[in-house]
Structures are given as structure tokens and as C-alpha cells.
Amino acid sequence: MPVVFLPSKKKIYTVCRSPHIDKKSREQFKILQYKKKIIAMSNNLLAICLLLHTIRISEFPGVQLHIVIQH
């Protein structure tokens, strides 16, 4: 199964720790979002259904799945 890497997104937030006394004291937080596309091709419908069922019952914390079926 080939894996296609799609563009990733990066967001950086800067928060002042103490806005009244020390303006130079800041914290930075970063959110990274990676996208990958997995291409699975098969003429066997049972194999594709088994693969989709395995992906659905697997728990990936913090991962969103978007499944598209073309025939």
C-alpha cells in the first residue's frame, strides 16, 4: 500500500505569562497537523471490507479518519 504525504499545517501561538509586570516573559505553543493518504487497491471486495473494518475498530487517539471508496 503506497502512502502519499500531503501538506502539513503548523500553527504557533504566543501567550504572555505576565502581561502587567514582565512583557518579555512569553510562552509558545505549537499545533502540528499531518495528513497522509493510504491507497489500497484490490479486486477482492472482501479484502477491502476487512481492511476498512480493521481501521474502524482500531482506536487512534487524536486521529481523524476520512474514508473514500471509489469503484
Image (cartoon, rainbow, N blue to C red):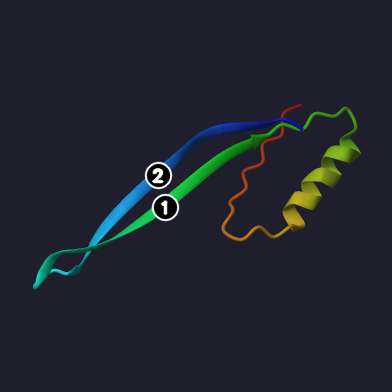
Q: Vertical placement of 69 versus 60: above or below?
A: above
Q: Earlier in the sequence, mark 1 or mark 2?
A: 2
Q: Residue at x 72, y 31 (%)?
A: 39
Kindly give the residue lying farthest to the left in the view shown.
21
Name the quadrant containing residue 5.
Answer: top right
Do residues under tags 1 and 2 come within 8 Å of each other at their CB atoms? Answer: yes
Element on which disc 2 rests: strand
Q: Residue at x 76, y 26 (%)?
A: 71
Q: Residue at x 58, y 51 (%)?
A: 64
Q: Position of residue 57 (x, y in %)?
A: 76, 58
Q: Residue at x 88, y 27 (%)?
A: 43
Query: As shown in the figure, which amino acid type bears the numbered disc 1?
Result: Ile
Marks 1/2: CA distance? 6 Å
- The 10 Å Cα crowd at callout 2, few under 14, some 14 to 19, many 20 or more, is few
Q: Position of residue 18 (x, y in %)?
A: 17, 71
Q: According to the image, label 2 marks what residue?
A: 10
Closest to the observer: 39 or 4? 4
Q: Position of residue 12 (x, y in %)?
A: 33, 50
Left or right of 60, for residue 55 = right
Name the quadrant containing residue 59.
Answer: bottom right
Left or right of 45, for residue 63 = left
Closest to the observer: 10 or 24? 24
Left or right of 34, for residue 48 = right
Element on which disc 1 rests: strand
Query: As shown in the figure, which amino acid type bears the numbered disc 2?
Result: Lys
- The 10 Å Cα crowd at callout 1, few under 14, some 14 to 19, many 20 or more, is few
Quarter of the image where the N terminus is located:
top right
Residue 31 numbered tag: 1
